[in-house]
Image (cartoon, grey):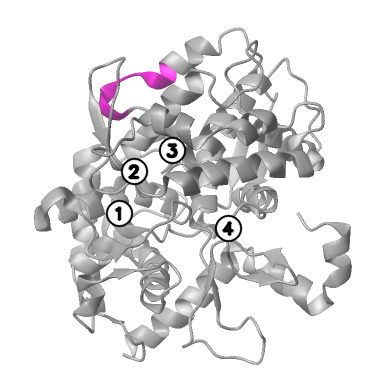
Amino acid sequence: MINDQQLADCSQEQLLAIAYLRTPAAIRERCDRLFHLACTDQLHYFRCNLTQLDPVAHYVIEVMRDEYPDLNIPFHSRWRHFEVGNVPRLAELEQHLAGLTPLEKAQAKFDLAMISVLLDAGAGSEWQYGEQETGLVFRRSEGLAVASFRLFCQGAFSSNPQFPLQADAQGLQNFTAAQLAQGFQVSSTNPLLGLEGRVELLQRLGQSLHSLPQLFGTENPRPGNLVNYLLQGLKVETSTQTNLQSPIPLPASTVFSAVLEGLGNIWPGRLTIAGINLGDVWIHPALTGDNPTAQYVPFHKLSQWLTYSLLEPLQELGVEITGLDEMTGLPEYRNGGLCLDLGLLEVKHASVVQERHLPESEVIVEWRALTVSLLDRIADTIRQQLHLTATQLPLVKVLQGGTWTAGRRIAAQLREGGVPPIQIESDGTVF
């Protein structure tokens, strides 16, 4: 959210640039420009080999049929990870929320999803989480999901003991690295990448909740109040008693815009325009133009992942989500690794896979941008092979079915521990 002083400091051109860089259309436009350069071998680190598009689509379809034989694929979202190990944690959550109204349940689920996604940056190959309730051990994204689920159910993010199943501004601002380390079982022998960065992200979220009452409420600011904001935008009376009587359409991009507006101030040390934080936006020197922001490449990976994860609680309220394919694929190391491991992307220098890279490095920006564009093309090819439309198989289902799982599978076959083909120096706030 841009406050009045920031507004006064911005020129009209700067305001338009900020608004544009916060759209899925901008993500696609900038990524596709780099993609076309890669196709003509004009980028420094990668080239594209589109002869591999059909084989990659075929491989992903095999994975989809293994995971979902009837191709009845859910959305790619955090909710899938909460069911890892065939443990009915979502049914357990429903039991905890019994007695709440439909709106209150949706608010609690928004709280959980937002916290869990913000804690979902890459864990590293050494960390694991032992779930006391089941005796099962999980790693990586699923481990982070289960650990955050358990912390949420314990009331770790609430400042009100009478209402433990919430995340509120005060609870988040008071949350400490020691609490996260204990809850996530972090030790010298079980290290977690970016521990401090994750905690700072939650603390900054708490501050943002306070500063944006129009989005998150005044009396008890919390992420879940974003439900009220979205429903009010649909001119829906936010009665706490019932679901909507008839489905009301809501574009996925509207949810995305609300997420970017609400979380814009929490990202550390990023590019800014007139002091306004742009979030997951980076520079690639191959892009040229008269505009000062012509080289800026937006991704908003965690914000899109979060948006996908907020859609299901809204659907449970009776909201009809539209425009799913306006959103983009997620530029992270499983989808990017799939493209690289199966030859859609080819590295031009051995150092790309031999060295560790910072998120702002040209090689990582390039890799992520090409991943976004290739995911669109993989999805189109899959639909052609399965004779399905984008409505029948939207990108969010291709990701779930899908490319993310396929990227993990091929990584496990090629490298010990299933590590990505390119190593990223993560601070816990990008991936």
Instruction: Specify which label sits upstream in the sequence, 1 or 2.
Output: 2
Q: Residue at x 25, y 71 (%)?
A: 355
Q: Is residue 300 visible?
A: yes
**Residue 238: within the magenta?**
no
- Where does the image place residue 371, in percent across and percent down from the top left? 37, 67
Instruction: Specify which label sits upstream in the sequence, 4 or 3.
Output: 3
Element type at marker 1?
A: helix
Give the crowd class for mark 1: few <14, some 14-19, many >=20 residues within 10 Å: many
Q: Is residue 362 left or right of residue 213?
A: left
Q: Quadrant of the N terminus?
A: bottom right
- Where does the image place residue 431, in percent across and percent down from the top left? 42, 54
Task: Report the residue marked by disc 4.
Answer: 268
- Where does the image place residue 211, in percent across and percent down from the top left? 78, 44
User: Residue 361: which quarter of the image?
Assistant: bottom left
Asked if labels 1 and 4 touch by Cβ distance under 8 angstroms, the answer is no
Task: Report the residue marked by disc 3.
Answer: 78
- The mark closer to the camera, 1 or 2, is 2
